[in-house]
């Protein structure tokens, strides 16, 4: 049996640190992931947060946001949030903390966690469709109430960037976006990476929120 402080000896394996609001939740996540041959659960106090940091919590409060910010700003670390419920107002805050994937706790089976971890490791996003819909609706209302965000026209987005973000907002994955736009998956990833870097956005969800707020999609 692997120990929780084991390092990752093979490049194909993903190291995961688990952060939970209670020890029972953490123990359950460790049990689910320890049986996966391509996952190594690491002790973040000894070896850092690993490739992916998995945060389990009931709700999103300021203490959780502080922890997410610290993890999200650690170089090379992707963050997956497993949560019971989330307020509409928390969505952009969570995206801004560097969370790339969100999983409802009621759906957090071993297979679902594994998918979210590998998706985050690749640098892609994995957000429940109902949350993405809430995000879109929220910023749709914002746009109807505002004449236009300050500075939106000074930054600008290319047609290719807005096309890709439109498809991201519809829930399409990288492979599906590439097929729709008749380009490579690498092109899609490069466009998104350049966009988020230029606008100092944290991830895809944050980019979609920005584009909605700025009126590009």
Image: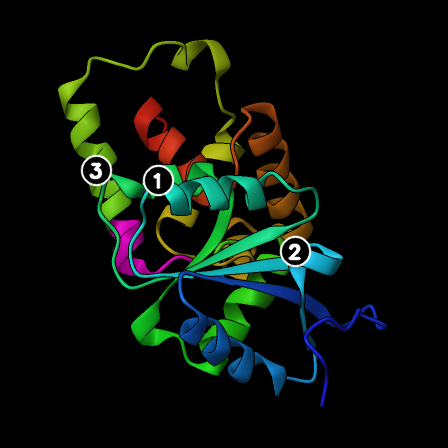
**Dot 3 surroundings within 10 Å: few (below 14), some, or many (20 or more)?**
some
Label annotation for residue 138: 3
Please identify, in this view, whether the residue under mark 2 or under mark 3 is nearer the observer: 2
Main secondary structure found in the magenta portion: helix
Q: Is residue 161 above or below residue 121?
A: above
In percent of width and height, residue 164 lies at: 48, 42
Q: Is residue 143 above or below residue 115?
A: above
Q: Residue at x 36, y 35 (%)?
A: 209
| Part of the protein shown in magenta | 127-133
Q: Do labels 2 and 3 touch, CB within 8 Å?
A: no
Quadrant location, the C terminus:
top left
In percent of width and height, residue 86 lies at: 26, 52
Pick whichever, 90 or 144, lies toward us: 90
Q: Do labels 2 and 1 touch, CB within 8 Å?
A: no
Left or right: residue 75 versus residue 182 is right
Q: Residue 7 in magenta?
A: no
Left or right: residue 8 versus residue 185 is right
Q: Is residue 215 above or below residue 174?
A: above
Secondary element under disc 2, as helix, strand or loop, is loop
Please identify, in this view, whether the residue under mark 1 or under mark 3 is nearer the observer: 1
- For residue 194, which quarter of the picture? top right
Q: Residue at x 39, y 30 (%)?
A: 211
Q: How is the image coloured?
A: rainbow
Q: Earlier in the sequence, mark 2 or mark 1?
A: 2
Label annotation for residue 49: 2
* C-alpha span from label 2 to label 3: 32 Å
Label annotation for residue 62: 1
Pick whichever, 72 or 5, lies toward us: 5
In percent of width and height, residue 155 lies at: 49, 14
């Amino acid at each position: 049996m692997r120990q929780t402080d084991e390092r990752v000896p093979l490049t194909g394996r993903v190291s995961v640190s688990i952060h939970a609001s209670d020890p029972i939740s953490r123990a359950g996540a460790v049990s689910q992931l320890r049986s996966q041959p391509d996952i190594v659960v690491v002790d973040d106090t000894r070896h850092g947060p690993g490739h992916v940091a998995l945060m389990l919590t009931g709700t999103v409060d300021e203490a959780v946001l502080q922890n997410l910010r610290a993890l999200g700003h650690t170089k090379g670390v992707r963050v997956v949030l497993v949560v019971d419920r989330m307020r509409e107002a928390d969505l952009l805050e969570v995206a801004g903390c560097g969370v790339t994937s969100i999983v409802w706790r009621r759906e957090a089976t071993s297979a679902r966690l594994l998918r979210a971890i590998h998706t985050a490791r690749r640098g892609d996003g994995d957000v429940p469709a109902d949350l993405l819909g809430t995000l879109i609706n929220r910023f749709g209302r914002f746009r109807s109430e505002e004449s236009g965000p300050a500075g939106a026209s000074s930054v600008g987005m290319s047609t290719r960037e807005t096309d890709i973000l439109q498809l991201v907002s519809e829930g399409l994955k990288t492979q599906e976006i590439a097929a729709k736009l008749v380009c490579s998956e690498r092109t899609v990833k490069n466009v998104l990476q350049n966009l988020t870097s230029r606008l100092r956005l944290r991830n895809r969800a944050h980019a979609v929120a920005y584009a909605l707020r700025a009126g590009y999609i």
